[in-house]
Image (spheres, rainbow, N blue to C red):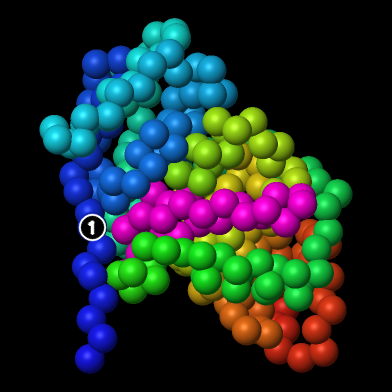
């Protein structure tokens, strides 16, 4: 029997201007990208330059971030925490009502379904930690020229934060990017995509009813079950052209 290695996860404390936000279960790869992505996704920062310095202490299991400006910690931490579902459990400070107040996504980009399936396959073939362990989640951005970048983690939401952090630090324009993920698209996953402004999010598995409702409200195209020559388009933003003769399901309310 061919045994794969076990995936890694560690408790990592995220500290912002001396305040501990929470302890997260994370895979140690690309922790700098994760910190940028999580802080952006949760509204602590609005741009890459809001962070003055970041120090990662893997031995102590801590990430220390200093902002260029102070933030109102009492007001922020008085907000109700929402614990995310699934492996690598995390915490978000945004409720579904908060997410509905995000700016609606605007993009004129359109894609053939066959192209999304091709990129999903390329993503899978290059997810090295998953191929090594069989137990990791991944998130991938596809740029306008077809270039893909992948980040992996034990938690699906952590992987998405990592790829958002990478995109933020590179100054990439979200309206020309595709976000692909291995994990279920739940409301907090959808909120991360919406916060950055991704117009298209695709997954190898399902989207929840709440995520689909938010996606329709925020004008984000969501495609699930991207596998082989099959897909389920949950939304109707008009950004995906079905160029396949079979295998497509379209869900409408």
Q: Position of residue 136 (x, y in %)?
A: 35, 64
Q: In the rendered view, would you say 48 is above or below 113?
A: above
Q: Is residue 225 left or right of residue 30?
A: right
Q: Position of residue 70 (x, y in %)?
A: 40, 9
Q: In the rendered view, would you say 64 is above or below 96?
A: above
Q: Label 1: few (<14), some or many (≥20) within 10 Å?
A: some
**Residue 87's image quarter?**
bottom left
Whether residue 214 is visible to the viewer of this picture, yes or no, is no
Q: Residue furthest front?
A: 2
Q: Residue furthest left?
A: 60
The quadrant of the picture occupied by the N terminus is: bottom left
Q: Per the image, is 142 magenta?
A: yes
**Residue 167's image quarter?**
top right
Q: Which residues are magenta?
A: 135-160
Q: Residue, x 44% and y 25% (percent of image)? A: 44
Q: Per the image, is 69 magenta?
A: no
The quadrant of the picture occupied by the C terminus is: bottom right
Q: In the rendered view, would you say 87 is above or below 229?
A: above
Q: Position of residue 71 (x, y in %)?
A: 40, 13
Q: For numbered disc 1, what is the local secondary structure?
A: loop
Q: Residue furthest top?
A: 69
Q: Is residue 179 left or right of residue 240?
A: left
Q: Tally the numbered discs.
A: 1
- Of 64 and 80, nearer the camera is 64
Q: Position of residue 230 (x, y in %)?
A: 66, 84
Q: Residue, x 28% and y 29% (percent of image)? A: 56
**Residue 249's image quarter?**
bottom right
Q: Residue, x 74% and y 43% (percent of image)? A: 175
Q: In the rendered view, would you say 185 is above or below 121?
A: above
Q: Which residue is under mark 1?
A: 8
Q: Residue, x 42% and y 63% (percent of image)? A: 128
Whether residue 45 is visible to the viewer of this picture, yes or no, is yes
């Amino acid at each position: 029997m061919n045994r794969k290695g076990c995936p890694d996860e560690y408790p990592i404390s995220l500290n912002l201007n001396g305040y501990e936000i929470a302890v997260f279960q994370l895979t140690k790869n690309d922790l700098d990208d994760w910190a940028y992505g999580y802080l952006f996704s949760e509204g602590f920062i609005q741009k890459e330059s809001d962070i003055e310095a970041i120090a990662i202490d893997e031995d102590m299991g801590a990430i220390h971030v200093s902002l260029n400006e102070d933030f109102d910690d009492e007001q922020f931490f008085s907000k109700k925490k929402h614990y995310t579902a699934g492996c690598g459990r995390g915490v978000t400070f945004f409720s579904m009502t908060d997410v509905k107040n995000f700016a609606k996504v605007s993009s004129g980009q359109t894609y053939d379904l066959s192209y999304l399936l091709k990129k999903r396959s390329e993503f899978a073939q290059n997810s090295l930690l998953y191929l090594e362990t069989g137990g990791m989640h991944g998130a991938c951005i596809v740029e306008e020229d077809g270039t893909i970048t992948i980040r992996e983690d034990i938690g699906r939401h952590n992987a998405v934060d990592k790829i958002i952090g990478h995109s933020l630090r590179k100054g990439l324009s979200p309206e020309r990017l595709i976000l692909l993920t291995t994990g279920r698209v739940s409301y907090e996953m959808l909120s991360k995509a919406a916060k950055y402004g991704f117009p298209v999010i695709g997954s190898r598995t399902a989207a929840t009813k709440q995520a689909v409702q938010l996606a329709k409200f925020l004008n984000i195209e969501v495609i699930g079950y991207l596998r082989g020559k099959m897909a389920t388009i949950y939304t109707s933003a008009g950004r995906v052209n079905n160029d396949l003769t079979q295998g497509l399901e379209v869900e409408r309310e």
